[in-house]
Each structure stands twice: as C-alpha cells, then as structure tokens.
Image: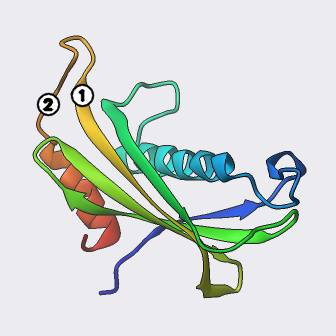
Amino acid sequence: MPKRYFVQQIVVRYSEIDYMGHVSNAIYYQYLQDAYVKFMYGLLGASYSERISQITVKTVCEYLDQVRLGDLLNLCASVTRFGSSSFDIGYEIACEGDQSHLVARGLSTHVTFDYQKNESVPLPNALKASVLAYQGSL
C-alpha cells in the first residue's frame, strides 16, 4: 500500500507577491501552517472552534524555485516522525501537473501540550493510530 499524503492546492494570489514579482518567503510559512491545521483537524475529527492540544515549536522552509502570481501549486504533507511528546510533518510544494518540479520543501515540529499545566504531554496513541490509518506508514 503506497503512503498517502495530505494534499492541498494553492493558487498564488496577488497579496502573496513581493516587489520582485514572486511569492514572498514569509508566505510559504503561511502555506505550511494552513496545511498543518487542515491536516490535523481533519485527522482528529475536530471542529475549528475547538483548541487542539498541540503547539508548533519549529518550522523550516527551503526555497527551491520562484513562484509567481497565478501559479497553481500542490502542497503534500505527511507525518514523518513520532517522538515521545512530539511529531514532525514534512512538506513538499510542487508545480501543479509536475510533482517532480519542487519549488519548496518544509518541516514543522509539533508538541502535544496540556494548556492548563503549561507542559508537554506524551503523544497520544490515538493520534499515532489516526496518522498511520490515514497515511499507511510514516
């Protein structure tokens, strides 16, 4: 069974373009965060009005090619690592119609968190099970 990825399509908007005519570097972090939120809320079956017990502790993005106004992109995301209280999500952003033409790669690390105690908590087995049921593997 091939690994399944969360996929989100992005149409580059005018407000995302910098004065050089391509997507501003900071916008990629918005793309990654939006994908993370939709991916996790979907996996957990939570409504957006609920607070999920996760915090983002690291985000990295590597820019591989320019993206311009009107470009159509596919963002693919998957959980790539489980820790004792954290997990990583890997991201690849490619041009629509050519998944081999990557324009950016990213990684984010998330910690499961108890907001009342203000501390990390062990990664729930239910989250691991949901990820593996969706993706098939890490």
Residue 95 rendering spot, x and y as whole percentages: 69, 78
What amino acid is found at the position of numbered circle 2 in the picture?
A: Val
Q: Nearer the viewer, residue 123 or 18?
A: 18
- Give the number of the disc on residue 4: none
Q: Is 34 placed left or right of 90 in the picture?
A: right
Q: Residue at x 49, y 33 (%)?
A: 47
Asked if disc 1 and disc 2 are in contact, CB closer than 8 Å, the reply is yes
- Give the number of the disc on residue 113: 1
Q: Quadrant of residue 129?
A: bottom left
Residue 60 lies, with reference to residue 135, above or below; the image says above
What amino acid is found at the position of numbered circle 1 in the picture?
A: Phe
Which secondary structure, mark 1?
A: strand
Quarter of the image for the C terminus: give it.
bottom left
Q: Residue at x 34, y 65 (%)?
A: 134
Outermost residue, top direction? Answer: 116
Which secondary structure, mark 2?
A: loop
Residue on which the image places disc 2: 121
Label 1 CA crowd tier, 10 Å (few <14, some 14–19, many 20+): many
